[in-house]
Image (cartoon, coloured by chain):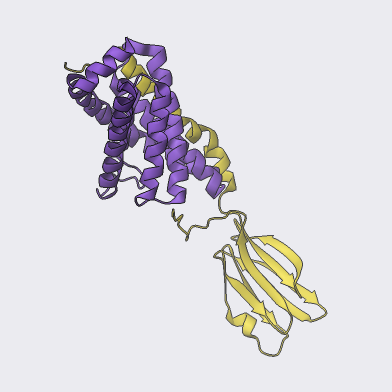
Chain colours: A purple, B yellow
Amino acid sequence: MAKTKRLVYISLLVTMALVLSLIERNIPVPFLTPGAKIGLANLVTVVALYSLPKKRDIIMMIVVRLFLTSIFGGSISGLMYGSMGALLSFLIMIFIKEVLKDKVSMIGVSAAGAVFHNIGQVIVSICIVRNIGVALYLPFLSVVGIVTGIFIGLSAHYVMTYIYRLQIGNYLISMRE
Amino acid sequence: MSIKLKKWDYIIIVILIIISFIPYVFFKGLIGEKTAQVYAYITVAGELYNEIPLTGQVSRKEFSIDTKYGKNTIVIKNESIAVVASDCKDHICEDFGYKGEVGDVIVCLPHQLYIEIKSNETMSKNQDIIAY
């Protein structure tokens, strides 16, 4: 029973991430920097980070999300950029959350995740274009990333209050203890 | 359950901004040297005759390419290259004029002369990166 609940919860998160990234694709980018995104799917990653007790489940959720997003209107190169970004951002978010624990709120975690997502994408694009000049674009992406990361962290915080109110939230809390 | 920015949030954000400017500091000089190394790649009968850098060549420079096929007089100025005189019979190579953009070519068929403007960078200023 517990396993089924967990699987359903992970699938719900994947679905949310998928829908959010599909919606995001249709939002015109309101920033001056092309290539910058709001990173709505990161919202779900942050929520997963704070609600799923096992890291393996979080990784599973991210991998499934990446594949489904690229199937639903992405491309192979999009998958390459996205997976490197997602990997780096996941690692840094886990690191910050585990090291600083209560000293840091979701806002800091989410902002770090957004910036490292950008760093991952820039690394991949350096490898593809074979020109290190792409790295000079990083500050522009990062500034936008920090701003959106702060808002994503804020939203994740409010989402979490509702998740804890649900039965599944109680279940997850009990599992963590 | 209201949210409050904690001290470490500010520290993280400051660190992130610093991190994102690191490549800017490190690669700035490197990029400046490397950009726009445009050169003229001259071949005669399919074999490399000479490579002449065009970047920074503002003053007029004249020289001739003398091969068994014939003689062409080349002029380089304002970072562009032209064939100004040729002893071939059709003189089409002179009509090309001054060429300086990456991808431009000047051909003199009777002399089997082929000049192409190339760059050591994969991108030129007229091309965009297209992400698929």
Measured as percent of width and height from the top left, residue A98 is found at 40, 15
Q: Residue furthest front?
A: A1
**Image position of B127 with respect to A172: above or below:** below
Left or right of B104 in this view: B71:
right
Between A147 and A47, the residue placed more toward the observer is A47
Which residue is more in the foreground, A116 or A136?
A116
Tell me: residue A87, above or below residue A80.
above
Image quarter hosting the C terminus of chain A: top left
Residue B101 at x, y percent in the picture: 54, 65
Residue drawn at (34%, 50%), measured in percent from left and top? A72
- Can residue A138 be seen by looking at this rendering? yes
Location of residue B63 (image quadrant): bottom right
Question: A168 or B85: which is nearer to us?
Answer: A168
Say if B130 sits above or below B32 in the image: below
Residue ranking furthest to the bottom: B89
Residue A162 to residue B62: above or below: above
- Residue at the image point whose x is 46% and y is 50% from the top: A76
- Left or right for A8, reference B121: left
Report the label total: 0
Q: Is residue B17 something one can see in this rendering?
A: no
At a point 22% along the width and 28% down the height, the residue shown is A155
Which residue in the rendered view is the most extreme toward the top?
A177
* Residue under the image location 58 percent in, 82 percent down: B95
Residue B96 at what x, y percent from top left?
Answer: 58, 78
List x then y, in percent, for residue A67: 41, 43
- Where, by quadrant of the figure, is residue A117 drawn? top left
Q: Quadrant of residue A94?
A: top left
Q: Is residue B8 left or right of residue B86?
A: left
Taking depth in this image into account, of A1 and B123 the one nearest to the observer is A1
Q: Quadrant of the N terminus of chain A?
A: top left
